[in-house]
Image (spheres, grey):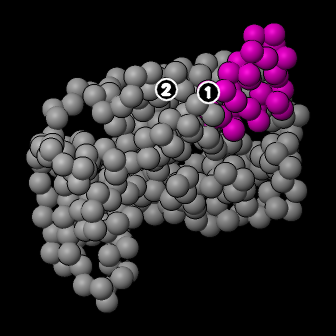
Amino acid sequence: MFDLEEIFPDVGAARLPRRQAGSPQGLGITLVTDYTLSARGWLPSAALVELFGEFGVSSAAARMTISRLAARGVLEGRREGRYSAYRLTDSAAANLSQGGRAIAGFGADPEPWDGRWTMVVFSIPQEEATQRRAVREHLRWRGYAPFFDGVWVSPHPLTPKERADLVEVAFGEMSVFRAEHLELATGASRNPVDAWDVAGIAAEYTTFIRSWSGVLDRMTTGSIHGAAAVRARTEVMDVYRRFPVLDPLLPADLLPPGWPRARAREVFVAVYDGLAEPAQEHVRGIVARVAGGTHPQIRAHTVAEMGAAFGRDDADAATTRATQPQ
């Protein structure tokens, strides 16, 4: 349930690969994004290869990964004297800025629930297995869960954009409702929240909190710096960014007391922001060793910056350019 194919929506021509843990391409995207997106800086390829090496990726595999990301339209390159450098393309920067804002805002300000459910009911002929799978995947990645066969539910209202997106994949017969659930005095009654494995989601949060609280303890002693800071910061993002897919922000009214979402977010912010400075200085040191000089455009952003204005104007402009007819 942690496949991340659509955690970021498609924008323009850039084709982002699956964001799977341990994927060199996913790692490359995270590294370039974390240290160049806020200032749209350029990262020398030799420095990027060295950073890959700190995660156990060979030089040959790192260079191949960079080439593949460039071929996908995720990275763009240029020559800077004797070396080449890369940064995100406009469309990839727009894509990842949008996704970053979603991750940064996840669970920050829960909205009140009106007690109603959005129900998507569809009937697709058995022989149209591809279309049926496409509809199910579309709904799952947008926080819906299968309640009964052909009935998917979400506690959140359908936004105009989500409605338009649903039209794009609609097939066979489909209806959408926004309705209240009425309990029946029978053991056969099923509550829509039972469509989710609430206990399983809580266990994932608890594991995250337990694992990364230990890192917080080490951070207070200043024992995480250099390459270790970059690795820890990259890994905490890689794990935490999966929660928006795993947890569709189920309303507090439906959850058991002490739901751990807020604490998980606190731990994520503390680790990601707390390691920003030592990780930034390590990356800048590698770039300086490769290219010489100082590189203020290599900058680690905080969660607040990721969720607020950084790159918003540039990203919006890039989105406009990327979606205009050529």
Give SS at disc 1: helix
Residues marked 1 and 2 touching at CB (< 8 Å): yes
Choose the circle earlier in sequence order: 1 or 2: 1
Majority SS type along the magenta span: helix
Tell me what residue is drawn at x 23 percent, y 62 percent: 151
Q: Position of residue 276 (x, y in %)?
A: 67, 23
The quadrant of the rendering that contains the C terminus is bottom left
32 in the magenta segment: no
> Residue 284, can we see it?
no
Task: Say which of 187 and 89 sits in front.
Answer: 187
Residue neighbourhood size for the residue with mark 2, other residues' Cα within 10 Å, grouped as few (<14), some (14–19), many (≥20): some
Give SS at disc 2: loop
The disc label shown at residue 39, or none: none
Report whether 216 appears left or right of 3. right
- Measure how far apart labels 1 and 2 are at the Cα level: 8 Å
Q: Which residues are magenta?
A: 208-237
Tell me what residue is drawn at x 42 percent, y 37 percent: 102
215 in the magenta segment: yes
Tell me the quarter of the picture where residue 325 sits: bottom left
* Residue beneath disc 2: 260
Note whether 67 is above or below 305 in the view shown. below
Report whether 212 appears left or right of 193. right
Tell me what residue is drawn at x 58 percent, y 31 percent: 206
* Residue beneath disc 1: 209
State the residue lying farthest toward the top. Answer: 221
Q: Position of residue 65 (x, y in %)?
A: 73, 61
Q: What type is the residue that disc 1 sits on?
A: Ile
Q: Position of residue 242 (x, y in %)?
A: 53, 44
> Residue 194, can we see it?
yes
